[in-house]
Amino acid sequence: MSAESYIFLAGASRGVGREIAKCLVEVPVKVKALLRGETSRDQLESMGIKTVTGDALNVGDVEKAMLGDEPVHAVISTIGGLPKDGERADYLGNKNLIDAAVKAGVRKFILVSSIGTGNSKVAVPPQALQSLGAVLAEKEKAEEHLINSGLTYTIVRPGGLKSEPATGSGILTEDCRIAGTIHRADVAKLVWRCLFSEAANNKVLSALDRNMLYSQAAFEEFILS
């Protein structure tokens, strides 16, 4: 990674994205965060993160933020949320980020998605699929767009998210049948490790806490080199 290149982070204002920001500044690497509003700007800039204002649902905003003079080595996206004008950021926002990353020649794109998308539907109870179906469908479309983009990618699908401090027991698996919960801070640590691991390239991985699984079914843990 060039000393002049950035990690571009979308979703840094809260949740898993904020936890990832904390991990990145400890490396340290240069981080640029896309913010829709001003609420988190001062906090992120005090951490040494460069911020740019823009809406991921706006192609122009995304391209302006990513295609500037400062090269972007990798993109990490945790965005999602409430619909805007009938469109969810889960798909359209991520699509815009992926398309801009292709234009920018980004080396790697990490998408934080969710267990319940794609082949991991089998891990989620039917009632949960029913209540989260619309969101999961949008996340699945984003995953598919990334896989088909030609970018080197890692898709991380966390289980149920909690906000307590990291336990250090976060694990990854390619086994789509496994479900459970995990703390956001542990997801962030796993994403950080995926960023610097070639073993994670072009993989779809579920993220869970080994001590908070919903079943004791045997599975193989994915080891990052």
Image (tube, rainbow, N blue to C red):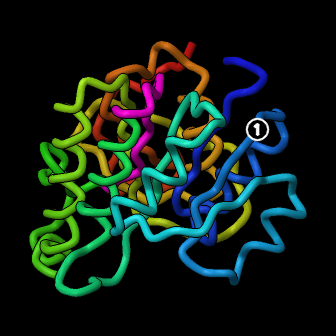
Is 136 positioned to the left or the right of 200 in the image?
left
Residue at the spot 22% in from the left edge and 87% down from the top edge: 85
Is 16 positioned to the left or the right of 42 in the image?
left
Residue at the spot 81% in from the left edge and 44% down from the top edge: 25
Q: Quadrant of the N terminus?
A: top right
> Where residue 24 sits in the image (x, y, percent)?
73, 42
> Where residue 10 sits in the image (x, y, percent)?
52, 57
Q: Which residues are magenta?
A: 102-114
In terms of image quadrants, where is residue 195? Answer: top right
**Between 89 and 130, which is closer to the camera in this rendering?**
89
- The answer to whether 48 is drawn above or below residue 189 in the figure is below
Q: Is residue 207 magenta?
A: no
Q: Which residue is mark 1?
A: 30
- The answer to whether 164 is drawn above or below residue 188 in the figure is below
Considering every residue shown, the one lying at the far bottom of the view is 85
Residue at the spot 74% in from the left edge and 45% down from the top edge: 23
In terms of image quadrants, where is residue 204? Answer: top left
> Where residue 47 sits in the image (x, y, percent)?
86, 57
**Between 24 and 185, which is closer to the camera in this rendering?**
24
Label 1 neighbour load within 10 Å: few <14, some 14-19, many 20+: some
